[in-house]
Image (spheres, rainbow, N blue to C red):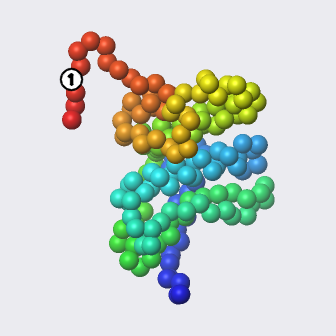
């Protein structure tokens, strides 16, 4: 088997204008893992869920004086070069990514609560018992869903399709 020639471009740990986990902080490892995973998912949406054999986004570690730091790297083949466009890299989280980050953070808190007190499993909302991140809409209401609430209108409502 042969290895395809690829180009690797570091695209950062999070969108350019967003705050990110800081190397050396106690919560760096967990927070960085969450942020990179969500950023990868956002990039996949932006680039149309490309075939991973031509364009994929991966989390990579790099040496730093305070330990290793992590960033998302675009791994691009010659065929994928037409798909990747640095001008499409987001400067902010989209609604889906914000909801995913919130959901992951809250799921982690529920997990810690249950580890400390196993009987608390009965209190965990169904949405946080999933192993996979739910599919959130690219809409501000996604944040409510990530918090475990389903926003419902009071009175008559017009459905938008």
The residue identified by callout 1 is: 158
Identify whether 92 is placed above or below 148.
below
Q: Residue at x 36, y 35 (%)?
A: 139
Please name whichever residue, 160 or 125, is drawn nearer the observer in this view of the structure: 125
In which quadrant of the rendered view does residue 154 lie?
Answer: top left
Q: Is residue 111 left or right of residue 84?
A: right
Mark 1: secondary structure: loop
Please name whichever residue, 58 or 125, is drawn nearer the observer in this view of the structure: 125
Q: Residue at x 45, y 73 (%)?
A: 53
Label 1 crowd (10 A; few <14 / some 14-19 / many >=20): few
Identify whether 34 is placed above or below 47.
above
Q: Which percent across, then down, holds residue 112?
A: 70, 34
Can you see residue 154? yes
Q: Which percent across, then down, holds residue 26?
A: 76, 43
Q: Which percent across, then down, holds residue 47?
A: 38, 59
Please name whichever residue, 45 or 63, is drawn nearer the observer in this view of the structure: 45
Identify whether 108 is placed above or below 55.
above
Q: Residue at x 39, y 30 (%)?
A: 141
Identify whether 21 is placed above or below 52.
above
Can you see residue 101? no
Q: Quadrant of the C terminus?
A: top left
Q: Which percent across, then down, holds residue 27?
A: 72, 42
């Amino acid at each position: 088997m042969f290895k395809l020639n690829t180009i690797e471009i570091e695209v950062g740990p999070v969108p350019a204008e967003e705050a990110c986990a800081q190397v050396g902080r106690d919560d760096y490892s967990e927070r960085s893992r969450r942020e990179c995973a969500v950023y990868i998912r956002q990039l996949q949406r932006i680039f149309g869920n490309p075939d991973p054999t031509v364009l994929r986004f991966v989390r990579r570690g790099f040496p730093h004086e305070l330990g290793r730091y992590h960033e998302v790297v675009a791994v691009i083949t010659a065929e994928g070069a037409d798909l990747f466009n640095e001008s499409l890299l987001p400067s902010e989280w989209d609604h889906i990514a914000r909801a995913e980050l919130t959901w992951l953070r809250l799921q982690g808190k529920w997990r810690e609560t249950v580890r400390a007190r196993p009987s608390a499993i009965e209190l965990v909302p169904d949405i946080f018992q999933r192993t996979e991140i739910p599919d959130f809409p690219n809409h501000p209401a996604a944040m409510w869903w990530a918090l475990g609430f389903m926003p419902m209108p009071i009175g008559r409502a017009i459905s938008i399709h």
